[in-house]
Amino acid sequence: MLRIVIIDDHPVARHGLRAMLEPSFDVVASVAEAKSLPRTTTGRVPAHVALVDLYLADDRPALDVIADLSVDLPVLVVSASRSPADVLAAMQAGASGYETKHAAAEAYAAAIEAVAGGDIYLSSQLADLIQAAMDHHPPAPEPAQLSIREREVLSYIARGFTHQQVATRMKISQSTVNTYIARIRSKLGLGNKAQLALAALRYPPVPGRAG
């Protein structure tokens, strides 16, 4: 069973998330601030995924908390904000996924399982919002060094598909998708999954693909 920790400064939100996610997940801790999380003797948080509210106690996004936790485990940001700027900032800080507090329990479960498995999670609605915001800016140059299939994978990632969903859509194995993603990250010099998600949103889709 996947072990998760919840960080949210609102008691009602913490209790609600815990009640919604148990018993499907083992909630190791539910705390108001990151410094209250349990740690092993090596300083690691004993969990597979951390759920973190974007705004903790003040009006500034908790990007430092996201950056610190994401060194050791995937971070799924949980926030009432649907602002493209907030989503991008969280992903740039190192989050592996972003889900809004408007989502159903099934969506949370899918998000947790996706990031725990090494995927990037961004709901299609959030991806659409970010893409719409980016449409107001000049597009990034097309990555000519990527193959058609690699660009197709990027197109699916930009729409919030998990690696397994990409594999199903493209009729290839998940290991092949993982290989494509590794090549993309290498060719574009992307250091982490968050940078991959941002690159996917910035680059144009393959014409006639990923529909």
Image (cartoon, rainbow, N blue to C red):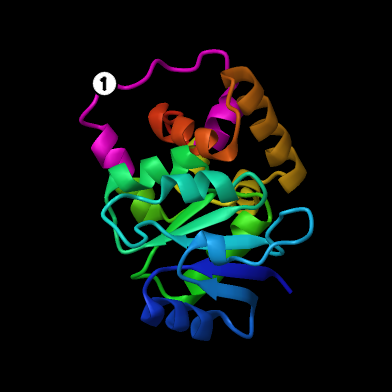
Which amino acid type corresponds to the residue marked 1 in the rendered image?
Pro
- Residue at 47% x, 40% y: name it: 93
Q: Is residue 210 visible?
A: no
Q: Is residue 95 above or below residue 57?
A: above
- Residue at 43% x, 17% y: name it: 142
Q: Residue 37 placed where, x, y %? A: 60, 65
Image quadrant where one finds the C terminus: top left
Left or right: 133, with 208 as reference point: left
Q: Residue 151 placed where, x, y %? A: 54, 28
Magenta highlight range: 130-154
Was residue 151 drawn as part of the magenta stretch in this picture?
A: yes
Q: Is residue 203 above or below residue 84?
A: above
Write down the residue under mark 1.
138
State the residue in front, 1 or 30: 30
Number of numbered discs visible in the structure rendering: 1
Q: The residue tagged with tag 1: helix, strand or loop?
A: loop
